[in-house]
Amino acid sequence: MYRSIVLLTLLCGVLTNHAIARDQIEIVGSSTVYPFSTVVAEKFGKETKFKTPKIESTGSGGGLKLFCSGVGTKTPDFTNSSRAIKENEIKKCRANGVGDIVEVKVGYDGIVMANAKSSPTFKVTRKDVYLALAAEIPDPSGAEVFIKNPHKTWKDVNPILPDELIEVLGPPPTSGTRDAFVELVLEKGGCKKYGWIKAIKKKDKTLYKAKCHTIREDGLFIEAGENDSLMIQKVLSNPKALAIFGFSFLDQNTDKVKGAEFDGIAPTFENIANGKYSVARPLFFYVKTAHLGVIPGMKEFVEMFLSDAATGQDGYLVDRGLIPMPESERSNLNSKVLSMKLIVGDISPSKMKEKK
C-alpha cells in the first residue's frame, strides 16, 4: 500500500512539474485516422480556449509504441489506431506504468486496392489477392503443404485476370492498415478457404499466423511507408500498379484513382456502411487517463471528437470519408467513453466482443 502511494506521488510530481512546459495535447499514431484527428484538432483550437493539439502520423504500431513507453509530458496523451490494440502492446503499457487506457471507437473505414482512374477497373476475389501477395501459398498440386509463392503475373494467379506483372504498393508492418489488410484479405479471404490450413490454427497459432499474415518480399509487393499521397503518385506514373490504403483517402482522390472490386463489390460509402464490402475495419484512438486533468483540454477534445457534429450520421468527418457507427452502437459506446469507463483490460474491448 505504502509503495503504491509513493509511486502515485512520484507520478503526480513528474506530471505537475512539467505541466507548465506542455499545455498542448500531443497525439501520435495511424495515418488513416490522422486526417480525421487533424480536422477535429483544428476546430478544437479555433472554438475552445485550448491550444490546437499537435498530431504526428507515425502509423498505428509506431504510435502505440510511443504511447506505451510511459507517463509524463515526454509521452503522448492520445494515440490513433486503425486497428484494436494488441495484447502484447497492453502488456508493454502496463510494464511501463501507463495505467488505465480508454478505448475510443470513432467509426469505420474500408481498405481499398486502387489503381489509376485511367486504367480498367480491377476485379478480384480476396483469394486471388492472397495467392498474389502471400509469401507462401498452398501447393497448387493439392498436396497439403506450403510452397514459396511462384506467381509473377495476375494471370498466373487466375487465368481470367490480366497478363500483367503483380505490382502492389502498400504500407509497412507498423501500419494498422496493413495489419487489417492481412487479416481480412490474406487470412479470412485466403487461408480460411482451405480446411487443412484452418486446422493448423488449432494446433499451432504461431505457425498459422506466420503462414497467413506474411507478405512476399521478392519485390512484387513494395512497401511505400505511411505516405498515402506517395502511393497515389506511384500508381499515376505506372497505370498497371495498384496501391493499398484507406477508403477515406480514396474518397478524397476520386479524380485520380479508383478502387478495385473485391468479390464483386465496389468500395463505396454505402457498401462499407451496410457491411457488403468485406475489407472494412473499425477506427480508434486511445486515451492515457494518467494525463487527464494534467494536460489541459483532453476530456474536452474527446467530447468534441465524439459529438454529433463530428462523428454523427451527418457529421463533418463523414463528409471527409469516415463511415459512422450505427446510432445504437455509437450511443452505447460513447456513454461509456465519455465517463472514461471503457477501460482496456487484458484485451481490447472491441476484441472481447468478437470473442463472445
Image (cartoon, helix red, strand yellow):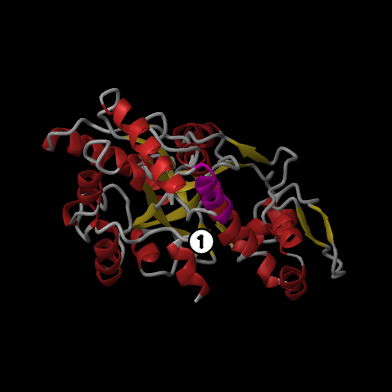
| Front residue of 252 and 323 | 323
Name the spot of residue 127 as percent of width and height, x first: 65, 63
Name the spot of residue 179 as percent of width and height, x first: 56, 51
Depicted 55 relative to depicted 116: above or below = above
Answer yes or no: is residue 135 visible.
yes
Name the spot of residue 328 as percent of width and height, x first: 26, 72
In the image, is 260 to the left or to the right of 191? left
Depicted 57 relative to depicted 204: above or below = above
Answer yes or no: is residue 122 visible.
no
Indicate whether residue 88 is drawn in magenta. Answer: yes
Res. 137 image quadrant: bottom right
| Front residue of 128 and 43 | 43
What is the chief secondary structure element of the magenta stretch? helix
Indicate whether residue 296 is drawn in magenta. Answer: no
Q: Amino acid at mark 1?
A: Ile
Count of numbered marks: 1
Q: Residue at x 72, y 48 (%)?
A: 153
Q: Secondary structure at mark 1?
A: loop
Report the residue marked by disc 1.
347
Name the spot of residue 2 as percent of width and height, x first: 43, 47
Boundaries of the magenta span: 87-96
In the image, is 59 to the left or to the right of 324? right
Q: Residue at x 50, y 37 (%)?
A: 69
In the image, is 222 to the left or to the right of 347? right
